[in-house]
């Protein structure tokens, strides 16, 4: 596997993790607001 392919997978994984974290934070803020 090429390094470029690995970086692409890593970026996708990072985006997935950050997206999930943002969703958790927004859910937490929503729960606190209610």
Image (cartoon, rainbow, N blue to C red):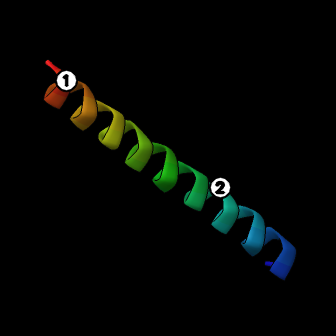
Q: Quadrant of residue 34?
A: top left
Q: Is residue 23 left or right of residue 6?
A: left
Q: Quadrant of residue 30?
A: top left
Residue highlighted by disc 1 = 33
Q: Is residue 18 left or right of residue 20?
A: right
Q: Kindly report the distance in space between the C-alpha atoms of the residues bearing marks 1 and 2.
A: 31 Å
Quick check: 8 above or below 27? below
Residue under the point 75% across and 72% down: 7
Residue 1, how many percent across, how many down?
Answer: 79, 78
Residue under the point 68% across and 62% down: 11
Number of the front mark, 1 or 2: 1
Q: Judge the density around disc 1: few (<14), some (14-19), many (≥20) Cα neighbours within 10 Å.
A: few
Number of the label disc, if any, that sits on residue 25:
none
Q: Nearer the viewer, residue 6 or 16?
A: 16
Residue furthest toward the front? 33
Residue highlighted by disc 2 = 12
Residue 31, how many percent across, how many down?
Answer: 16, 27
Report if the CB atoms under discs 1 and 2 are less than 8 Å apart.
Answer: no
Q: Is residue 2 visible?
A: no
For label 2, the SS is helix
Quick check: 11 above or below 3? above
Quick check: 15 above or below 24? below
Give the mark nearer the N terminus: 1 vs 2: 2
Q: Nearer the viewer, residue 26 or 11?
A: 26
Q: Is residue 23 left or right of residue 10?
A: left
For label 1, the SS is helix
Residue under the point 15% across and 30% down: 32
Q: Is residue 24 left or right of residue 33?
A: right
Q: Is residue 12 visible?
A: yes
């Amino acid at each position: 596997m090429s390094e470029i392919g690995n970086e692409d997978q890593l970026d996708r994984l990072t985006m997935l993790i950050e997206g999930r974290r943002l969703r958790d934070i927004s859910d937490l803020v929503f729960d606190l607001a209610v």
